[in-house]
Amino acid sequence: TMAHSKSLLVLENFIAGKFVPCSSYIDSYNPSTGDVYCRVPDSGKEEVEAAVKAAKAAFPVWSSKSPLERSQILNKLADLIEHDLEAFAQAESKDQGKTITFARTMDIPRAVYNFRFFASSILHHTTECTEMATMGCIHYTSRAPVGVAGLISPWNLPLYLLTWKIAPAIACGNTVVAKPSEMTSVTAWMMCRLLEKAGVPHGVVNVVFGTGAKAGEALVCHPDVPLISFTGSTLTAQRITEKSAPHCKRLSLELGGKNPAIIFDDADLTQCIPTTLRSSFANQGEICLCTSRIFVQRGIYSEFLKRFVAEAKKWKAGNPSDPTVDVGALISKEHLEKVRGYVKKAQAEGARVLCGEGVDSLTLPTGNQKGYFMLPTVIAEVKDESCCMQEEIFGPVTCVVAFDTEEEVIERANNVKYGLAATVWSSNVGRVHRVAQRLQSGLVWTNCWLVRDLNLPFGGMKVSGIGREGAKDSYEFFTEIKTITIKH
Ligand code: NAD
């Protein structure tokens, strides 16, 4: 009915500086209540075509602006998002199910920082020059923006990951067509409302909303989009690689993980336990960097397990807008069922579920009874070959197993197809270096987790990705290099 549809938030695509309605829409759910609260454009080829056209038209002017001019616009956009930080955080929490605390302290501040960071870093790149005196030549390299960049992002850290792509892409002088996840589109739409005020010219940033199969694939297959930066699952990345191959597109792929934590018997457990709880359960375990395999050296195994489980039981699940809540809702009903399915499989294989799903009772406020909640779940005695130790679960589930030697644990930690992030806990500096060097992982944090310097490369090995993002890496991805020789 009209009355019903009026109460829903209805998003529109943002193309050539204007909000444009779409002919069909997809329902978007509030994960903490299970209600449909928003309608997202179900864009396809036609909408992507219009967005690419606008981005192409905006490219000549935007790409010829100086880095300083672009930098000033990025900084202005950062200020505007920061000014509305609370509204963005509320929206992200409602749309995604994450706690308001996480959105306030992590997602939105980082989105702001992404723009500030690339506004600054774009001013500091240098190119190479060599001299060939005997030939009377100098050679130098020159970098230029590539054109229209296609940006596709997932639902777990919606604005955070989308801006991690938009900021470097436009800082380098490209124009973009972005497609956020159909499950979490609201904050991207809110950001579009600020672009004009920030001074972003029409057509520089276009956002088309919709599903991966329709809108995402239209973008990947579009002949005038020479580069695609994608963050999401390995399965989708394989499809994107196939679909883009006929066009020889440049791809940056940031994919899933099955991240180990390796805890030696000389680890400082007072630091290690709270950090490993966070690395396992932060954002409901829906971060690509979350720990899901904890290897603990035999001598401290039972003590670690006892303390870890006792602390995990203290995590409170409930209404994400309650600032005392630690665990919000999972993204969807289907995802919740998938994550629960892994716990059931582990049980069927003879593993022990020590807390959380199926063990502890979950009491929810009346308004949240239909939300997609699950308690932090710790599983012990899981075999390395089990799907729970091999596949990305992407929920608040972590497996704890014992190991004896350094050599053994390196081999077991590397024994998965993924290679995104690892943590190592030990007070032996030599061991920390040795183990970090041998782990097949794009990122290794020792005695900490998720401490990031955006200057340095981010990305995964093996099926966790291709390419890296960071100050220099994103600059290289979003620009085309040329070598020029001058003979005098
Ligand atoms: P997903 O692959 O299902 O979707 C990601 C995006 O791709 C969405 O916008 C989706 O609509 C789109 N998409 C889906 N099919 C497509 C297709 N055929 N063509 C083009 N686009 C398509 O992933 P998700 O479930 O949204 O996100 C969770 C996954 O993302 C996890 O595997 C997680 O590890 C990974 N992730 C990785 C990183 C990283 O930096 N490495 C960060 C966050 C999340």
Image: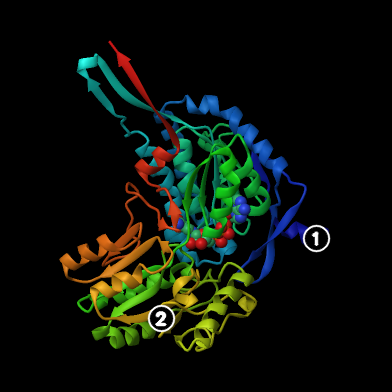
Q: Residue furthest right?
A: 1
Which amino acid, by three-letter code, is at mark 2? Ala
Residue kind at label 1, given as amino acid type: Ala
Q: Which residue is at the front of the view, 184 or 423?
A: 423
Residue drawn where x is 50% and y is 56% of the image: 86
Q: CA–CA distance between discs 1 and 2? A: 44 Å
Q: Residue furthest top?
A: 488
Ligand 1 is within 8 Å of the C-beta of the residue at disc 1: no
Dot 1: what SS?
Answer: helix
Q: Which residue is mark 1?
A: 3
Assign the N terminus to one quadrant of the image. bottom right
Q: Point out the frontmost of discs 1 and 2.
A: 2
Asked if residue 306 can be seen in this view, the reply is yes
Q: Earlier in the sequence, mark 1 or mark 2?
A: 1
233 with respect to 136 (left or right): right
Residue at 38 percent across and 84 percent down: it is 309
Residue 155: name its quadrant: bottom right
Q: Return the residue at label 2.
A: 312
The quadrant of the rendered image in which ligand 1 is seen is: bottom right
Q: At 52% from the left edge and 33% from the top edge, which residue is drawn?
A: 199
